[in-house]
Image: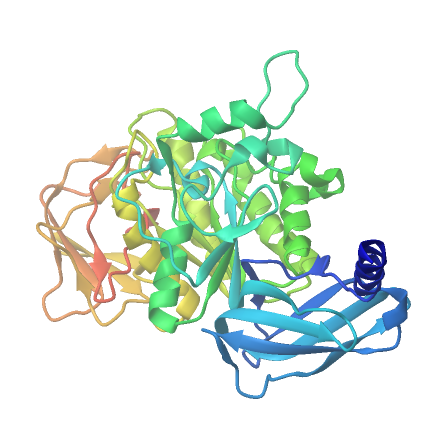
Amino acid sequence: MQKAYLTLLTFVAAVATAQTFEITGGVVPYQLVQRDTENRGVFRLEGPAAKQLAGRPVEARLLRAGLVVEGFDWRQAGQVSGEQWRAEISRVPVGGPYRVELRVTGAAGIRSVEPLLVGDLWMLAGQSNMQGVGNLKDLPAPSALVYSFNMADQWVPAEEPLHRLQDAVDSFHWRTNPGEPKTPLSGEALRKSIASRVKGAGVGLPFALEMVRRTGVPVGLIPSAHGGTSMDQWSPSLKEQGGASLYGGMLRRFRATGGRIAGVLWYQGESDANPKASPVFAAKFQSLIEAIRVDFQQPDLPFYYVQIGRHVNDANIAEWHLVQDAQRRVETLFRNVGMTTAIDLELDDGIHVGTDAFPALAARLANLAEGKVERGPRPVRARLEGNRVLVEFSSVNHHLRHEGRLNGFTIHNAEGKPVPLIFRQRVLAGSANTVELLFGGKLPEGAAVHYGYGKDPYVNLSDAANMPCPVFGPLRIE
């Protein structure tokens, strides 16, 4: 009797096993799917099924907070074909977190994937100030509406540090010792490396949190930056190297997350502020933006970047400014490309933006991404009028403003050397977009105005939307 009972159980188990199906492909927990122009997304799933299930429908339903989403109760979403099945839940509204449940008639149980979001994906690229070298303290709390595709190609809740190079999939990011092959960290070495980190906060997570706060639209981040890297190392010509190059790795990660994003956030240029690279920086930067839009197949892909900021160092001042001015000019060449600056922000060391300053920088980038305000004061002309120079600006939100005594403007001679003439800087009375520089003495021939001269200036000009004036110069005085 007992033997017969065991035989029956074995038979039932075999039948049950034969009738199962599994999820092995498609969306995974903590994944964000890019919304389309109608604010909808698509969840695709697939996997193996028992051959006895061939031809049967795959039904799906969608839940949020334990409740069925209106219009997404059980309905056919796919079919078993041979020993494989595929399903697609389309027109999912922006939001989440969602739970997808699947069933096949005759198969035991329900399969599910959660949590999932529909929203906006942002690529994070550049060098250390995008990778993040802020102190890992006083960090923002994670959000249920912000996920990250980490550098190990895993979807996870977004938290600092976003950029974990130690175990990245792409080999460019791996550390190496001289004479040894590049390998990712793993096991105890990886655990110790992670546990010992005291730096790593960046602008990506504060940006995502700010966008969610403003719009309610979930955000997914694709961290792809690497500290100390130059424009040559980001060259699109290296894309065929795949993950052995920065551009190739970024492109691979773009495709791995669905092949469509909301935009790119970029912060790079410090490594190009040298005599060799700075003269050609503008052309390379322009080519990079053009290549990304072609390779991502998004001709008007939003691309927002940060002008390089402070460096407590006096080397290569001219080259530093050449890169800054190139960045200021490149934004005028494209649609949906914008720049902000970090020149007025606090640092956590000699060159890296501090953790407590990232929320302000994130708000500036969010302003560009939302497109509801002007990009901030941009210099138009400087003209001489008696014993004062009037500097006029465009793209000002309502009016120019500053906290404390206005500072940051200098007058330079034709050779580019600063000449100490200005005794007062102020916003022109009765004007919303003009700064008045009062000076004593005589202007040198070929005189020009700079703003933010030097690598560690103190500047404080912005506008009513808290969009700061970028570093500029030379701007010839007419």
Give x and y (percent) for residue 38.
57, 81
- Say which residue appears at 57% left-offset and 72% top-offset: 35
- Say which residue appears at 47% left-offset and 41% top-offset: 268
Quarter of the rendering containing residue 58: bottom right
The residue positioned farthest toward the bottom in the image shown? 71
Which of these two is toward me, 408 or 448?
A: 408
Would you say residue 379 is visible in this rendering?
A: no
Residue 124 versus residue 181 in the image, above or below: below
In the picture, the quarter occupied by the C terminus is: bottom left
Colour scheme in the image?
rainbow
Which of these two is toward me, 49 or 4?
A: 4
In the picture, the quarter occupied by the N terminus is: bottom right
Which of these two is toward me, 32 or 378?
A: 32
Give x and y (percent) for residue 42.
64, 73
- Say which residue appears at 20% left-offset and 41% top-offset: 458
Give x and y (percent) for residue 39.
54, 78
Quarter of the rendering containing residue 22: bottom right
Q: Is residue 188 left or right of residue 319?
A: right
The residue positioned farthest toward the top in the image shown? 179
Would you say residue 43 is visible in this rendering?
A: yes
- Say which residue appears at 69% left-offset and 56% top-offset: 295
Residue 165 versus residue 123 in the image, above or below: above
